[in-house]
Amino acid sequence: MMSEAASHLPEDVTAVQQALIAWYEDDHRDFPWRRTEDPYEILVSEVMSQQTQLDRVVAAWNDFLERWPTVDDLAAADRADVVGFWTDHSLGYNNRAKYLHEAARQVRDEYGGDFPTAPEGLQELMGVGPYTANAVASFAFNNGDAVVDTNVKRVLYRAFDVPDDDEEFERVARRLMPEGESRVWNNAIMELGGVACEKTPACDAAACPWREWCHAYETGDFTAPDVPTQPEFEGSRRQMRGRVISILKDADELEIDDIGPRVRVDYVPDSDGEGSREWLLGLIRDLEDDGLVEVVEDGETIVARLRR
């Protein structure tokens, strides 16, 4: 009896696999993290790449590894410096810098400097979820499962008419990946989604290797699964948090009313709503809860500084 996952795939799965791997190995984007099997370097690239364009990540990745070349170097670093680096390079979500720093300390202190090699072990590291753990296991150790991100879902949805259902995407992705080939396979299928099967497809221009099997190519229906939209960054709370971190990075500590005008030009301490002291304190308290900032209150004076 044909499995539910196999029902979405062509009869000759081996031909599908070989076509994609040959296409990838013939020509692909040359990102520097694709030239290493160092789990630390790969983890840094994966954390930086979350909701950040890969072309922008390259310079930040190189700068980061120049400053902290090994996991031990990062573990020994001042957390405020790591968070400041994240802000300076506009990588967004400063929590990622904190978690990456904490993960480095775990590897040093709990694993003797050696990364776990399986996805399950990697998920024990701070801030490392199932997707990132699987990516590091695949690209560093060739020991992962099939990666399923937004790009992969779009490819499977279009090529093999897979329903927009996470469990079904996982089943089909696992069935497609050749056993013991997670490194090249996951790189290849994500490259396919990033180069040939983007939101606006480039099937012929990118010489998509799956055209002969692709349902979308045959029918001309290039709709894609629903993807949650990323909120606008400009003027967002995320942007304002980043500004607070950037301001505190260049000062030992500052009173809250000295921070306010640098975060927003329309800062009015005693006003209501956004731009008020109450609004700014809420922002700083959020950063304090995230372990990024320390807040000291002395009567009516409120001082903030980066946690070190």
Image: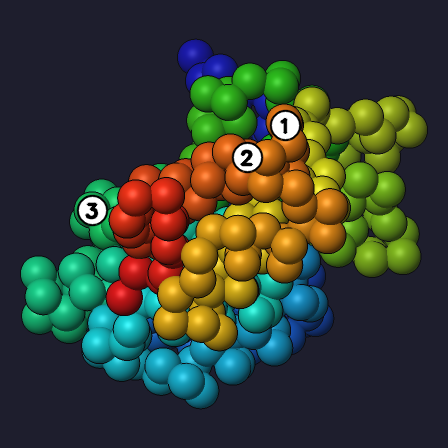
Between residue 175 and residue 292, name the one nearer to us: 292
189 on left or right of 143: right
**Can residue 207 be seen in this snapshot?**
yes
Question: Marks 2 and 3: which is nearer the front?
Answer: 2
Quadrant where the C terminus lies?
bottom left
Residue 144, horizontal then vertical, whole percent = 34, 50
For the point 44% across and 62% down, the residue is 254
Query: CB under 8 Å between callouts 2 and 3?
Result: no
Name the residue furthest top: 1
Residue 198, horizontal then vertical, whole percent = 77, 45
39 on left or right of 229: left
Q: Secondary structure at mark 2?
A: helix
How many angstroms separate mark 2 from mark 3 (CA)?
Answer: 35 Å
Q: Three-letter amino acid code at disc 2?
A: Trp
Query: CB under 8 Å between callouts 2 and 1?
Result: yes
Quadrant where the N terminus lies?
top left
For label 2, the residue is 279
For the point 22% across and 77% down, the residue is 76
For label 3, the residue is 124
**Can residue 210 be seen in this snapshot?**
no
* Numbered tag placed on residue 273 in the rendering: 1
Q: Secondary structure at mark 1?
A: loop
Between residue 28 and residue 274, name the one nearer to us: 274
